[in-house]
Amino acid sequence: MPSVVTNKMVIIGVGLIGGSFALALREAGLVKHVVGVGRSRENLQRARKRGAIDEIANDLPSALKDASIVFLATPVGQIGGIMAQISPHFEPGVIVTDAGSTKQDVVAAARTHLAGHLKNFVPGHPIAGAELSGADAADADLFRNKNVVLTPLDETSVDAVKQVTELWQACGARVSQMSAAQHDKTLAAVSHLPHVLAFLLMNHVSYSSAQNLDDPLPSDDLLRFAGSGFRDFTRIAGSSPEMWRDICLANREALSRQIDAYQKELTALREILARDDGEALENVFSSARKARQRWLKANL
Amino acid sequence: MPSVVTNKMVIIGVGLIGGSFALALREAGLVKHVVGVGRSRENLQRARKRGAIDEIANDLPSALKDASIVFLATPVGQIGGIMAQISPHFEPGVIVTDAGSTKQDVVAAARTHLAGHLKNFVPGHPIAGAELSGADAADADLFRNKNVVLTPLDETSVDAVKQVTELWQACGARVSQMSAAQHDKTLAAVSHLPHVLAFLLMNHVSYSSAQNLDDPLPSDDLLRFAGSGFRDFTRIAGSSPEMWRDICLANREALSRQIDAYQKELTALREILARDDGEALENVFSSARKARQRWLKANL
């Protein structure tokens, strides 16, 4: 069990992630008072109605007064600006953690804006579905059996990591640690690349009549015949454009490398088709199916 | 309601599709006696146990004797060979239809092997999930609210199309007609391309340590952090390698054109990343999300 019950937690960005974290910790009895900070008062009111927060912040200084934990759960592009705003109001000992989907940029922002406070800063990333957004989508079970990756800095104290680890474990999550660089490379492959592929496929099929195909197909006709495989493949293309803009920009180097490698594999498959090589094609598909079966067996 | 109850139906390939068709027609009271033909006696026995078929064929001549409908539901690569085997044993008036995922190759095979019988041949394709296989996966509701595309030849009689249409409608399906060429182009975009992308992503992530990346990542570590978005995106990578080999070879021209167009879009996105263009990136993602929302609203 966690060693500390949080008296006052400040959540900045009370959407799916921030709201779910608050609901889960409240359900676990680990937080007494939650203050919500956000751009949309309407969303904060919904968060209060749902019991995710107790109080809507009027200003940052009073929100941060006596806080034990500050949880940054805005889109990753805003985290630097928020750090700059909040750091003058920190009280000694307050733990700061975040839920940004990329970590090297968050660490860089912390080095700029939280320079005197790195001991208590624990960068984190809960890997949980996020194609819904807003406090309405918050769910106390969102993180159950999901991975949360913490990427502590050299300066981060063992105790701060321990406290944040225990909070996530109380949400039912599996917590692991790696470097911010390793995190960003890993997520570029297993998350950022698939999102890009899904967004592009959706556009490809929807606007192919406008494309430079020799023989364009009307997109309405195309999409009428898309089935459940297409639906599942493109589910992540329903994700927030703003959030994914930020993620792709923040991690554009690792993502670009993944796109290049994937393009090579598409080209290789294109060549297999050109030489009508059924055996090679079946091998590609068969190794993919086996890899997926192994993964499902090991992880789900 | 269908005008004709089928006295005897022969299903060649009693897997997910063949078995589900039989179960649905039986539930609708439209078929009296179903004979199953297949490579695996074990699978046919399971199909009989599940009530999909009444009888396991011992030989083709007796299976086809007095049959009203023959349903070809094997992987599409086998359909030509099967047509050659069965055509000598047709009785006059028997309707032949298929469930092949590509249609130009099936039509070409019919022109070769069913030349005297084209009036009663109705090429068809039920667009229903197929990542499970075998008679065990058969489900009377598989085709409910799913699209079935028929691609009749000029020679196909109106009456044969009507009978096959009514059978599929009795399974709860939405039946439409288009040319075999239009079908194959449509499916290349909405089905074959996404399957290829999913198979390749699974390989990409699983074997990236073996690839020519500057800085390879261990694949076990990568896959540990793949979440539910990855799982849904790659669901179709669990599909049958043999079936997808056949589909991709049969439709390789249209599929290759789709791969080429998609690669151009990946390259364009790569350039957006290279010039750090947040606005263009958000537009790409936002148009994809809107297209998907429109599609879900119109079709599901």
Image (cartoon, coloured by chain):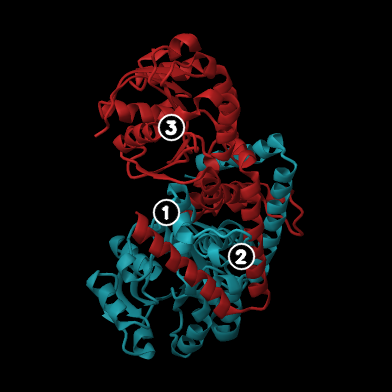
Chain colours: A cyan, B red
- Residue A5 at least partly seen: no
Which SS class for mark 1?
helix
**Letter of the chain that mark 3 sits on in the rendering:** B
Which SS class for mark 2?
helix
**Letter of the chain that mark 2 sits on in the rendering:** A
**Letter of the chain that mark 1 sits on in the rendering:** A
The residue under the point 58% across, 51% down is B193
Picture quadrant where residue A272 is located: top right
Q: Amino acid at mark 1?
A: Arg
Q: Position of residue B71 (x, y in %)?
A: 44, 26
- Residue B203 at least partly seen: yes
In the image, taking residue B245 as reference, residue A61 lies left or right, namely left
Q: Amino acid at mark 2?
A: Asp
Q: Which mark is residue A224?
A: 1
Dot placed on the residue nearer the N-terminal end, 1 or 2: 2
Which SS class for mark 3?
helix
Q: Which residue is mark 2?
A: A184
Determine contact: label 3, label 1, CB under 8 Å. Answer: no
Q: Position of residue A157 (x, y in %)?
A: 55, 71
Q: Position of residue B269 (x, y in %)?
A: 63, 69
Q: Which residue is mark 3?
A: B17
The residue under the point 55% across, 35% down is B107
Point out the frontmost of discs 1 and 2. Answer: 1
